[in-house]
Image: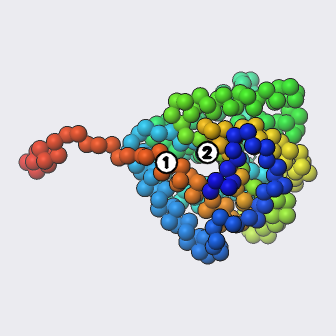
Amino acid sequence: MDRYRVKPGQQINLTDYDPDDKSVFDLNKKTGKKKLKDVNKELETLQETLYAENKHKILIILQAMDTGGKDGTIRHVFEGVNPQGVRVASFKKPTEIELSHDYLWRIHHHTPAKGEIVIFNRSHYEDVLVVRVHELVDPKVWQRRFEHINAFEQLLADEGTTILKFFLHIDQKEQKERLLARLQEPDKRWKFNPNDLAERKYWNDYMRAYTDVLNKTSTEWAPWVIVPANRKWYRNLVSGTTIVDTLKKLNIQTPSFKEDVQGWIDKVQTL
Ligand code: ATP
Ligand code: MG
């Protein structure tokens, strides 16, 4: 999975990353979906132990262009996982109150506690993406933010948070198809947002902003993974496998039971 990870200090160019790539898993849609079921099961077990151990904190950040598949990734990768101990935090346009604070104020509160997995559906990265593209603050202001963000994520990591950041990479052609599908399929119409068409005009500006994000904020303690996301099954498999591999490395353990087991069994039997 290393091939999609942006190494600290690496200067990537998004045009070198093919959103259609499927070279890591030599599978087709059908077998890919089947493999995801195995990944789901592994994740389910790991999450159960993580929750029981109550030690590690896991933060997963999802960023993508509109229709990029953040919702679908959450739904498919976390399918079957016990909702106790897993939480999604979605970050929309900031409210008046949120805007009256610094941009990390609304974020910090949602970071994971011990034993928890939190998924950020959009994040503080919007403050160097949409905010930059639409010139919502002076360039001098957003340019300083890369440093704040790295320091903020380092604070979280130092205090025991494992951070993974996914950029779900689709191209404009795929976005057009997904917008059309949202209109053509009645069950999906509620997802169509006319504003996505206006946003699409800024595609190149967003790609420039994302390139900076990926080059400036992929660190040892909070790496970015560029997920080829034109194919949904492949996107799910890459994200799911990366999460499972990362959790496995944490050596998560069920808490040991230090009491006298037989003594307690005897006691319960007399109840
Ligand atoms: P969906 O997949 O359901 O469309 P979404 O994440 O696109 O999910 P929307 O309600 O459509 O949700 O859009 C949220 C909007 O809020 C996005 O356009 C995003 O750029 C914007 N947003 C998020 N954070 C900020 C921020 N800090 N400043 C300005 N806009 C923000
Ligand atoms: Mg949207």
**Does residue 29 appear in this view?**
yes
Of residue 49 and residue 242, the one placed in the foreground of this image is 242
Q: Amino acid at mark 2?
A: Leu
Q: CA distance from mark 1 to mark 2?
A: 13 Å
Verify CB contact (< 8 Å) between mark 1 and mark 2.
no
Q: Position of residue 9 (x, y in %)?
A: 73, 39
Q: Residue beneath label 2, please?
A: 164
Left of 215 or right of it: where is 28?
A: left
Q: State ligand 1's quadrant.
A: top right
Q: Which residue is mark 1?
A: 249
Q: Tell me what residue is drawn at x 66 percent, y 38 percent.
A: 219
> Quarter of the image containing the N terminus?
bottom right
Residue 192 shows in the view: no
Residue 127 falls left or right of residue 72: right
Residue 212 place in picture, x, y as percent: 81, 40
Question: Residue visible at 29% across and 43% down?
Answer: 256
Q: Secondary structure at mark 1?
A: helix
